[in-house]
Amino acid sequence: MKTVTFIIILILISYCGFTQENDKIKVKGFIDTYHAVRIDNPNDFMASRSRFRGELEKVNGNSYFFVSINALHNNVLPELSKIQFREAYMEYTGNTWGFKAGRQIIIWGKADGLKVTDVISPMDLTEFLAQDYDDIRMPVNGIVFSKFSKNWELDLVCVPVFESYILPGTNNPWGMDYAELGLVEDEALTPDFKLTNIEYGGKLSFYLSGIDFDISALNTWNKAPVYSYYINDSTDIMHIRPEHHRLGFVGAGFSKSLSAFIIKGESAFYFDKKFSPKPKNYEAGLLESNSINYLLGIDWYPGNEWTITGQFSDEYILEYSNENALNEHTYISTLGVSKKLLHSTLSLSTFGYFGLNEGDFFNRTSADYSLSDNIHAMIGYDWFRGDSGVFGRYNKNSQMWVKAKFSF
């Protein structure tokens, strides 16, 4: 059935390609293949996948229609091989208002690779952060209503259907095998599909000379699960249960240009956020507290096609309890450097996350060479270090990878 569906989709895309000039339909997309090998023993393949992405868009006056389709074959994790709609939405833009409805990626915030207010679209962590960030961010089924003028824009968001992070399974080299820890993982506790569980919020943005800033508020759910523990009375075995709970925040952000620099920042105050306890304190259940998450960053463009970026973020848990599995402050910083060479046909880049509490880090260094306008060849190294922390837990997963991409 999937094969038949895919053939039909290809026929439709091909047909649209032949009629695009008359009907104002544009067809584009890419084919890419990516393969990664673990540096440490047993030197196994961490990833081996190939993908077709087809994108179709049509403009008709103030109306816009967009569909993107993924066809993925995964050799390391065959269960992830699939054909799916990634995005499918309609959009209308008038003189002072508009809307966008359907499956779409909703991006809030100013940060690069860190989430402060950008929490509407969940993340695909099947390979943790060892993917392009555009592939990590997931679409949601939602409606965005916009009202705007020259210097401001109000976006009202409604997401009827809850979607959580995609986490790696136990047969995945990026996954956690709870059985090895003597734990049984239960099915996740997720919100029911009903009117009272919709996500809703809004963002008001201002675009002034040399500075942009926004304020936002959202009534949502924690897309990344928190974990509770309990002991099964009949088996005397400890269970771990992923849970999702209501979460609200108010936030603000700004971006200010100063010559060759862009200064940016974000902050969010989270209400009644749930936190996992330490396993030894499992009887306390989930902990609830307000928290403050903030970020400051700088982008520097010194010329000659150099780009240097840096960020510092902190999540501060108010009314902190020592039973909490997290630190009172969770400090993460990032540093990125990129340079284009050979008439911009070669791009060299490195981007690193640093967990300042535990001294762990993750760095991705890569080279991207444009063989032609359509074909890119890439090679890179993902480096994990640390004895603990969110990045240190993958210290055996450092890998070399190659990627090739043809765009059409």
Image: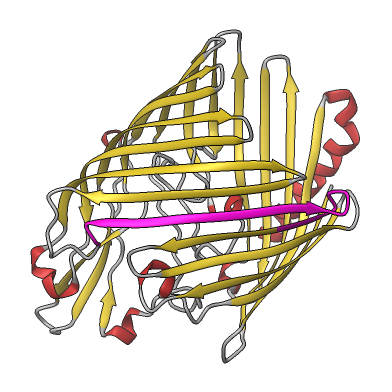
Q: Nearer the viewer, residue 16 or 406?
A: 406
Q: Position of residue 85 (x, y in %)?
A: 62, 47
Q: Position of residue 324 (x, y in %)?
A: 18, 62
Q: Is residue 338 magenta?
A: yes
**Residue at x 18%, y 73% (from the top left corner):** 279
Display coloring: secondary structure
Q: Which residues are magenta?
A: 327-348
- Image height of 316 relative to 142, above or below: below
Left or right side of 350 for 3: right
Query: Main structural element of the magenta stretch: helix, strand or loop?
Result: strand
Q: Nearer the viewer, residue 361 or 79?
A: 361
Q: Position of residue 390 (x, y in %)?
A: 39, 67
Q: Is residue 380 magenta?
A: no
**Residue at x 17%, y 48% (from the top left corner):** 318
Whether residue 124 is visible here, answered yes or no, is: yes
Q: Nearer the viewer, residue 356 or 398?
A: 356
* Residue reaching furthest to the bottom: 42
Label tally: 0
- Image height of 230 relative to 83, above or below: below
Left or right side of 79 for 311: left
Task: Give the quarter of the image for residue 323.
Answer: bottom left
Whether residue 109 is visible here, answered yes or no, is: no
